[in-house]
């Protein structure tokens, strides 16, 4: 049985983890399928948005430790190589100039949370919990961005709670601390995700890509360079056919009285 299902429809590329019998624990084959989708998102102009989701009880319980151990994952050199592959994948998700949406329909632990933190948007159902059990379960750090990405996202205060103390946060708390953007009722979740993805497809792909680059630049803390980027980006965008078409549509809209 395939561990991942892939669908391309109306500009939305969707990767769905389907390994419910193993709580969607992530295997090398699942990582390879995700890597392939990320590559295609970057290369295929018809693909405008990537959605990463799952079916079953969990979004994912994290990396499949049994599979990793069978590959020699506990040996230093092999472990570093495996980490590097994962780091490169998550870095690419962060850098690619198209929106990537993580849609966690259930518990999202370990690598799942690290993956979530690399995405642009995080949506979850009301039965989702988030956690990093690496220290408690394995006596290691969440080494694929569990700390380095969470600190800028939710601050050291909550990162210590999740990564050091090993405490989980439910959907409502995840929303309150800024870990997710929106929480939806479990029954409504697939529809809400589809509508959000469609709303992104409807936006200017060029503007979204430049906005993603600009936000990353601003997050690095150089405000002068970030404002320079804003001006340069808009200089490019105002010359695009899409900008001119939208200006024309705005100018010709029916007046409101």
Image (cartoon, rainbow, N blue to C red):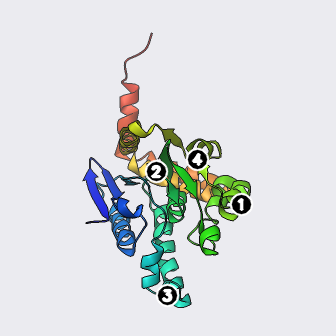
Q: Earlier in the sequence, mark 3 or mark 2?
A: 3
Which is nearer the N-term, disc 1 or disc 4? 1
- Front label number (1 vs 4): 4
Q: Which residue is labeled 3 in the image?
A: 78
Q: Earlier in the sequence, mark 2 or mark 4?
A: 2
Quarter that holds the N terminus: bottom left
The mark closer to the camera, 3 or 2, is 2
Q: Depth check: 142 or 61 in front?
A: 61
Q: Is residue 225 visible?
A: no
List x then y, in percent, for residue 101.
Answer: 44, 52
Question: Dot 4 surroundings within 10 Å: few (below 14), some, or many (20 or more)?
Answer: some
Which of labels 3 and 4 is toward the front?
4
Question: Residue at left 42%, top 61%?
Answer: 23
Instruction: Check whether the beta carbons of the residues at disc 3 and disc 2 lie within 8 A of each other.
Output: no
At which x and y percent is residue 68? Answer: 45, 79
Residue 146 figure quarter: bottom right
Write the residue at 53% across / 85% down: 74
Residue denoted by label 2: 106
Residue located beneath label 4 in the image: 170
Secondary structure type for disc 4: strand
The correct choice, above or below, for 110 with respect to 57 in the image is below
Q: CA distance from mark 1 to mark 4?
A: 16 Å
Of the 4 image quadrants, the one containing the C terminus is top left
- The Cα–Cα distance between marks 2 and 4, rounded to whole angstroms, is 10 Å
User: Circle 1 sits on which residue?
Assistant: 160
- Number of residues whose C-alpha sits closer than 10 Å to that of mark 1, classed few (under 14), some (14–19) or many (20 or more): some
Residue contact at pointers 2 and 4, CB within 8 angstroms = no
Q: Secondary structure at mark 1?
A: helix
Mark 3: secondary structure: helix
N-terminal-most mark, 2 or 1: 2
Q: Give the CA separation, mark 3 to mark 2.
A: 31 Å
Q: Position of residue 149 (x, y in %)?
A: 61, 62
């Amino acid at each position: 049985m395939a561990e991942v299902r892939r669908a391309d429809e109306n500009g939305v590329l969707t990767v769905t983890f389907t390994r419910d019998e193993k709580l969607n624990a992530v295997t090398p084959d699942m990582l390879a399928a995700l890597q392939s989708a990320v590559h295609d998102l970057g290369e295929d102009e018809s693909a405008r948005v990537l959605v990463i989701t799952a079916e079953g009880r969990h979004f994912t319980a994290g990396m499949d430790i049994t599979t990793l151990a069978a590959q020699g994952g506990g040996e230093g050199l092999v472990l570093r190589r495996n980490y590097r592959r994962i780091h490169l994948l998550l870095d690419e998700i962060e850098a690619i100039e198209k929106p990537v949406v993580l849609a966690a329909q259930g518990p999202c632990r370990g690598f799942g949370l690290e993956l979530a933190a690399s995405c642009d948007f995080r949506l979850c159902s009301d039965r989702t919990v988030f956690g990093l059990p690496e220290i408690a379960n394995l006596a290691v750090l969440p080494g694929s961005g569990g700390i380095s990405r969470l600190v800028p996202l939710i601050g050291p205060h909550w990162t210590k709670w999740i990564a050091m103390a090993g405490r989980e946060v439910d959907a409502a708390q995840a929303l309150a601390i800024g870990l997710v953007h929106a929480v939806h009722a479990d029954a409504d979740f697939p529809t809400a995700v589809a509508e959000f993805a469609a709303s992104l497809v409807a936006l200017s792909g060029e503007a979204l890509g430049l906005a993603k680059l600009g936000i990353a630049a601003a997050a690095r803390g150089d405000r002068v360079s970030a404002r320079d980027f804003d001006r340069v980006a808009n200089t490019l965008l105002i010359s695009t056919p899409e900008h001119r078409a939208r200006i024309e549509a705005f100018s010709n809209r029916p007046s409101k009285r």
